[in-house]
Image (cartoon, grey):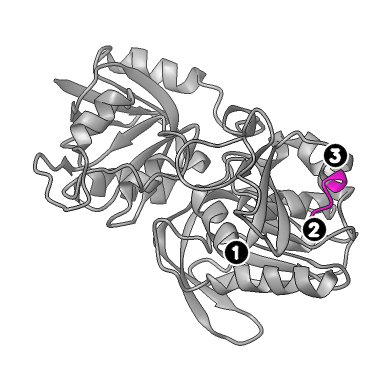
């Protein structure tokens, strides 16, 4: 079935539907990862976005029940040059077509993704719509321009958990306590869920932490009443300025316990420091972003997914220093408080998908909690 992609600047791209029929609006972005498509689709940070994969063949190793980063896909739509009709991998429990159909994901293939990606690099990520039903260019263009976009919008409320729970392993978010005597955690970490990826929770648990996940709107006094040894501010979707309620509560946590921010967590910290954030032209999305550690000059290859960044020069209320810089465009990728036990990074040290170069940041967080304790 024929499909159209309409961008708000009037540009059209043709393709074919793969799976379900329908129409979806979202911010059109691109991801340069060669693999990890299932993790990308289930990453809550992609809420509100239609993802274009730059690698030309997607889906050859199928899908499984383990490589998921949330309770289900969060992307608004998926675009590729070609979706594999063949699945070949010993871990596969299904194919991509069945996955799209089961989870009601609108997917389009046979798109000139090189031309689409180049256009987004030159013009920037923009509002768009994909459709297999309405194929009238003027109608689609009008709908794309009328869509609210993501600037100033609270997308976190659509992906955060609805109630507090304890992470006790894979599968559904188990809220019951584990059997007495089955866990002897060394440290307790409270994760503020702005759209947390499960691999963050897995890593914390594997380090011996008791992991408690709370909704994004949880009050600081309730978090501190849990007597955590540390607080992790998770990744999440959209514009950090659309989540003012979280910024206010984060400020109340300063100096009480160590804090580690990841991706949106760093942006929220930047705003809590009194600074500003800004929208990147086309964002950073992929598993091969070069990040330099300023103290050592060491370069890490990292996974990233964000469209906003902290304006470091706007932070005047707190003494902070830059710890990491993106070598592609020199944006700030890491910030650390000079007086309080708080640090953050813009990239994803938990990977999934991507390289494991920066797993050591979780060790840093654990050591910081031990020292503070």
Q: Is residue 185 left or right of residue 55?
A: right
* Image quarter of the C terminus: bottom right
Of 224 and 243, which appears nearest the observer? Answer: 224
Q: Earlier in the sequence, mark 2 or mark 1?
A: 2
Q: Percent x, y for residue 11? A: 33, 32
Q: Which residues, given as a range, are shown in magenta? A: 224-229
* Circle 3: element type: helix
State the residue position of label 3: 222
Answer whether residue 342 is visible to the viewer in this image.
Answer: yes
- Sort mark 2 into few (<14), some (14-19) or many (20+) by Cα contacts within 10 Å: some
- Sort mark 3 into few (<14), some (14-19) or many (20+) by Cα contacts within 10 Å: few
Query: Is residue 4 depicted above or below 200 in this figure?
Result: above
* Image quarter of the N terminus: top left
Residue 228: within the magenta?
yes
* Circle 2: element type: helix
Residue at 59% x, 45% y is 167
Residue at 65% x, 60% y is 209
The dot on residue 331 is 1
Query: Is residue 178 depicted above or below 300 in this figure?
Result: above
């Amino acid at each position: 079935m024929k499909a159209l992609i309409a961008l708000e600047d009037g540009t059209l791209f043709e393709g074919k539907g793969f799976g379900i029929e329908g129409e979806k609006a979202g911010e059109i972005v691109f991801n340069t990862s060669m693999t990890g498509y299932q993790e990308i689709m289930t990453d809550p940070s992609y809420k509100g976005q239609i993802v274009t994969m730059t690698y030309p063949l997607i889906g050859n190793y199928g899908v499984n029940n383990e490589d998921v980063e949330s309770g289900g896909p969060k992307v608004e739509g998926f675009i590729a040059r070609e979706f594999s009709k063949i699945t070949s991998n010993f871990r596969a429990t299904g194919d991509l077509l069945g996955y799209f159909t089961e989870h009601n994901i609108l997917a389009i293939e046979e798109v000139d993704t090189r031309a689409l990606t180049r256009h987004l690099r030159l013009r920037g990520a923009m509002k768009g719509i994909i459709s297999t039903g309405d194929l009238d260019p003027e109608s689609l263009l009008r709908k794309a321009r009328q869509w609210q976009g993501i600037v100033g919008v609270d997308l976190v409320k659509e992906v955060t958990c609805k109630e507090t729970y304890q992470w006790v392993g894979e599968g559904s978010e188990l809220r019951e306590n584990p059997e007495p005597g089955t866990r002897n955690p060394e440290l307790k970490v409270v994760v503020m869920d702005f759209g947390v990826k499960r691999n963050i929770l897995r890593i914390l648990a594997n380090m011996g932490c008791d992991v408690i996940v709370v909704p994004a709107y949880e009050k600081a006094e309730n978090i501190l009443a849990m007597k955590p040894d540390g607080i992790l501010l998770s990744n999440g979707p959209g514009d950090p300025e659309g989540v003012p309620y979280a910024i206010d509560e984060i400020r109340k946590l300063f100096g009480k316990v160590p804090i580690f921010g990841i991706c949106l967590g760093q942006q929220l910290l930047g705003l809590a420091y009194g600074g500003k954030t800004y929208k990147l032209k086309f964002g950073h999305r992929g598993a091969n972003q070069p990040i330099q550690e300023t103290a050592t000059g060491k370069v890490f290859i990292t996974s990233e997914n964000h469209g906003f960044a902290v304006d470091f020069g706007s932070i005047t209320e707190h003494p902070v220093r830059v710890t990491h810089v993106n070598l592609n465009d020199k944006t700030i990728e890491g910030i650390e408080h000079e007086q309080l036990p708080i640090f953050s990074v813009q990239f994803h040290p938990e990977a999934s998908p991507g390289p494991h170069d920066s797993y050591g940041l979780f060790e840093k967080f654990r050591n910081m909690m031990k020292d503070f304790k």
